[in-house]
């Protein structure tokens, strides 16, 4: 008689793997907060901006028409910016409210030169009022692109912002739009302090930083290895364009970023 056999089923054990560490995010994403404008508690618009630091003073740079625009009767009295509060968990963020007027006087500064008004404005931020754990990356004067010859016509650019308010709502990060140079960099387009870019842009990206990769960062720029070329303002179009037959030009105005040096000049003693 054959002895009965016993089958021993092989048991497999699944061991849960540890969650992978969060991916490192380029500091460029943390230098460009979203801006929301308000009158009191009434929300108005969304826009883009970026941090600029000079002499230990922190500023938010954006388009002037984000803060005030007479043709559209846009007159917010405060803005809110998004602040990340944990460098390893970008899902954690908070809103930070900034008044635009104190006792009826504007606390922001707008640009102007010999060619007229410049659609750029800065507002100083009270860094001490930020949450202690706030994660902020800043451009500085060392990031400004001052060598025009170092920006040939085929240089790839990025516009960092929130088109139509679109962004990663989980991690609260901006998106990048690729752009090209559409007018010679270093030459004032039509006599104004701006140059043209070729890129798909939308409402909500006004005030965004226009940057190019810094391939040889210095000690002063290593933590944010990008060159700051301009501040995106608005799309350029032809007044006589046939809206049915002709596509939009796809061109945009970007104001030269060196206006930030004028707007953040320390007050005279």
Image: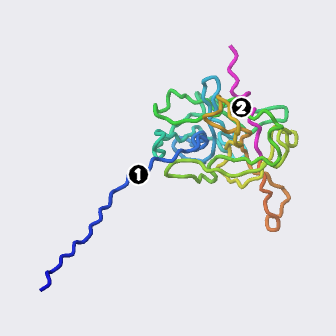
The stretch drawn in magenta includes residue 249: no
**Label 1, label 2: how many angstroms apart (C-alpha)?**
43 Å
SS label for mark 1:
loop
Q: Is residue 100 above or below residue 207?
A: above
x and y percentages locating residue 39 in the rendered image? 56, 42
Q: Quadrant of residue 116?
A: top right
Q: Is residue 114 above or below residue 269?
A: below
Q: Kindly report which numbered mark, 1 or 2, lies closer to the viewer in this rendering.
A: 1
Q: Nearer the viewer, residue 9 or 241?
A: 9
Give the label on residue 19, or none.
1
Total labels drawn:
2
Q: Which residues are magenta?
A: 253-269
Q: Is residue 240 above or below residue 214?
A: below
Q: Residues within 10 Å of mark 2 (few under 14, many from 20)?
A: many
User: In the rendered view, does 15 fall on the left or right side of 175?
Assistant: left
Q: Is residue 127 above or below residue 39?
A: above
x and y percentages locating residue 92 in the rendered image? 45, 44
For the point 84% across and 60% down, the residue is 241
Q: Nearer the viewer, residue 222 or 134?
A: 222
Question: Which residue, given by chain and number where applicable, does mark 2 sit on?
Answer: 260
SS label for mark 2:
helix
For the point 75% across and 35% down, the residue is 145
């Amino acid at each position: 008689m054959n002895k009965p056999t016993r089958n021993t089923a092989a048991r497999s054990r699944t061991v849960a793997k540890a969650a992978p560490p969060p991916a490192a995010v380029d500091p460029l994403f943390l230098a460009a907060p979203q801006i929301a404008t308000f009158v009191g508690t009434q929300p108005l618009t969304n826009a883009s901006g970026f941090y600029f630091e000079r002499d230990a003073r922190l500023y938010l740079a954006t388009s002037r028409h984000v803060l005030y625009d007479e043709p559209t009767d846009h007159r917010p009295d405060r803005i809110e910016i998004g602040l990340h509060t944990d460098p390893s968990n970008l899902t954690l963020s908070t809103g930070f409210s900034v008044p635009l007027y104190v006792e009826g006087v504007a606390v922001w500064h707008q640009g102007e030169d010999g060619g007229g008004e410049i659609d750029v404005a800065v507002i100083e931020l009270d860094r001490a009022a930020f949450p202690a754990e706030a994660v902020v990356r800043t451009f500085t004067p060392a990031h400004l692109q001052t060598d025009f010859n170092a920006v040939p016509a085929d240089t790839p650019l990025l516009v960092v912002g929130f088109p139509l308010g679109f962004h990663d709502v989980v991690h609260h990060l901006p998106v990048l739009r690729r752009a090209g140079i559409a007018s010679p960099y270093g030459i004032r387009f039509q006599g104004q302090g701006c140059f043209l870019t070729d890129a798909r842009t939308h409402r909500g990206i006004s005030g965004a930083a226009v940057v190019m990769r810094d391939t040889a960062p210095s000690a002063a720029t290593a933590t944010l290895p990008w060159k700051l070329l301009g501040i995106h303002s608005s799309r350029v179009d032809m007044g006589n364009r046939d809206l049915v037959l002709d596509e939009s030009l796809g061109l945009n105005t970007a104001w030269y970023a060196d206006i930030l040096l004028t707007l953040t000049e320390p007050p005279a003693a």
